[in-house]
Amino acid sequence: MAELQVALVPALSDNYIYLAHEPATGETAVVDPAQAEPVLNAARERGWTITHILNTHHHGDHTGGNKEVQAATGAPIVGPKADEGRIPGIDVALQEGDTYSVGEAEARVIFTPGHTSGHISFWFHNADVLFAGDTLFALGCGRLFEGDAEQMWTAMQKLRELPDATRLYCGHEYTRTNARCAVTVDSDNTALKRRAQEIEKLRERGEPTIPSTLGEEKATNPFLRADAPEIAQALGMPGADPVEVFAAVRERRNTY
């Protein structure tokens, strides 16, 4: 196994930028740099040298710092091939099945459209780390801006196949609101109710809810459980296709 030390760098109103440091080689990736200054400062404080810039999708709150970080570090900008024309400064374009390494940590690229048409996730399989951008959130998923429910449900199924121990790092601190919605569609889930209480306490203290693990998400995230009969029942949709259930959960979340 490789090791990735991940630092959370808050940005804008609720974004997280990540620094992923592989200590054996000293290589460090910045993931989805919304802004340059906070992440450059965070790397400097830790004595880490940024050697890679990874983008999960084209939105400006994930790519806005690309060129400034590159100007300061010389790091290549890496992103989805399907969004190649919309990623500022892209040098390396990746698609499903490709791999990309940060030192000894190797990411497998997973195509996860729905939030955007070209979204990818980086699964560092030998370090138990997933950077899911705005596809999978703690207790949530991204809005369907450029895709549809069928695409996003397909992405959810891909991600829930990953090992339970995988640490999930997502693009925003949305977990408290996600939890408040989740308990309305999975109210008998004792693990979810317990987790929602813990999340409230963390946010009251101003602490992040990230990372979670995929094991936690599989047990409590309704967007990964759209094929669970109890969720369809709670929505008044017994026997419905999971895509329809997923869409209904997403519509409910849109009202929060």
Image (tube, rainbow, N blue to C red):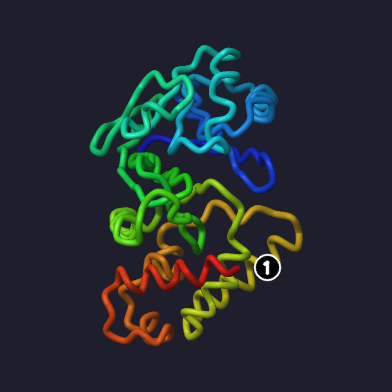
Residue 144 horizontal/vertical position (percent): 43, 55
Q: Quadrant of residue 157?
A: bottom left
Residue 255 horizontal/vertical position (percent): 57, 69
Which is more toward the observer, 194 or 81? 81
Local SS, label 1? helix
Image quarter in which the C terminus is found: bottom right
Total number of numbered discs in the rendering: 1
- At 63% from the left and 30% from the top, the residue drawn is 35
Which is more toward the observer, 137 or 88? 88
- At 69% from the left and 61% from the top, the residue drawn is 202
* 228 over 119 or under it: above or below: below
**Residue furthest to the left:** 97
Residue type highlighted by circle 1: Glu
Which is more toward the observer, 114 or 70? 114
* 143 over 26 or under it: above or below: below
Mark 1 highlights which residue? 200
* 54 over 169 or under it: above or below: above
Q: Quadrant of residue 17?
A: top right
Q: Quadrant of residue 200?
A: bottom right
- At 50% from the left and 72% from the top, the residue drawn is 252
Residue 167 visible in the shown view: no
Image quarter in which the N terminus is found: top left
**Residue furthest to the right:** 205
Residue density around tag 1, few if under 14, some if 14–19, many if 20 or more, within 10 Å: some
Residue 24 horizontal/vertical position (percent): 45, 25
Q: Is residue 72 left or right of residue 88?
A: right
Residue 239 visible in the shown view: yes
Residue 211 horizontal/vertical position (percent): 54, 52
- At 46% from the left and 35% from the top, the residue drawn is 58
